[in-house]
Amino acid sequence: MIQFFRQISGRANSNLFASLPNQSSLQQMAFLREIQREMKEKNSLDVPLKELRVVVFDLETTGFYPEKGDQIISIGAVKMTGSQLKEQETFYTLVKSNLPLSSEISALTNIYEKDLSTAPIAKDALMQFFQFIKSDLLVAHHASHEQAFMKRITSDALRTRFDHRIVDTSFLIRLSNPYMKSAPLEEVCEECGIEVENRHHALSDAIMTAKVWRHYLQLAEEKGFRYLRQVYEHLAKIG
């Protein structure tokens, strides 16, 4: 009988410790809490545009609907300060997916299931990305796509909220060329005289998006805008 209780106790203790977060998980949670704290203290709206630090990023995905199970298969990003594009400070990773890739997605992205077989799982890829971006403001082209997927993957993989602000490139495009605000990235690039290279590769798209952001940021400054807050207030007035 005593041996029986020892066995039960041993199994219970093993299950208890198995359910506890390990040291790595605790460090990750602490890191994410620190990022969330920093974002609450930041006020990007009143940072001069020429000093504004952003991370421009792009996602490639299995489809368009994270709420229906579509997943991220690659993340690319590049850092900027003001209009300075820091091409030496980039991020790229594939992300393992448990969904079969359609031939259309593989043809579009040049990513195949064999490429994803050794890629980091979503949780690890996401932590690497957060370590790169920290609490910086994010920029994306047609950002609702990135926003939806980042919210879902952060919730599913890390069990926390995605709190980063993402600014859509259309935010600045509307100031100078409102007819281009909904255009695909390649059309906006052509309008700005930016060479289109390796389309639908997450890092290449992020760099092209960064060049678009730089182009319209410089135009905004030429129009007299000095802070994001001024841009928000102006766009709110014109609707």
Image (spheres, helix red, strand yellow):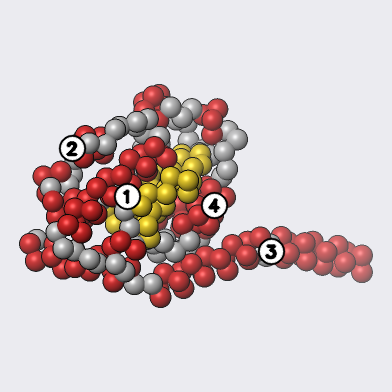
Q: Nearer the viewer, mark 3 or mark 2?
A: 2
Q: Is residue 91 above or below residue 41?
A: above
Crowding at dot 3, Cα within 10 Å, few <14 / some 14-19 / many 20+, comes out as few
Q: Give the labeled residue for mark 4.
A: 128
User: Which residue appears farthest toward the bottom when viewing the image?
Assistant: 41
Q: Earlier in the sequence, mark 1 or mark 3?
A: 3
* Disc 2 to disc 4: CB gap under 8 Å: no
Residue 132 is situated, as x and y percent measured from the top left of the image, at 50, 54
* Disc 2 to disc 1: CB gap under 8 Å: no
Q: Nearer the viewer, mark 1 or mark 3?
A: 1
Q: Give the labeled residue for mark 3.
A: 23
Spatial separation of the CA atoms under disc 4 and disc 1: 18 Å
Spatial separation of the CA atoms under disc 2 and disc 4: 34 Å
* Disc 3 to disc 4: CB gap under 8 Å: no
Q: Is residue 69 left or right of residue 168?
A: right
Q: Earlier in the sequence, mark 4 or mark 1?
A: 4
Amino acid beneath label 3: Gln
Mark identifier at residue 140: 1
Q: Give the labeled residue for mark 2.
A: 191
Residue drawn 31% across the image and 53% down it:
83
Quadrant of the image containing the C terminus: bottom left
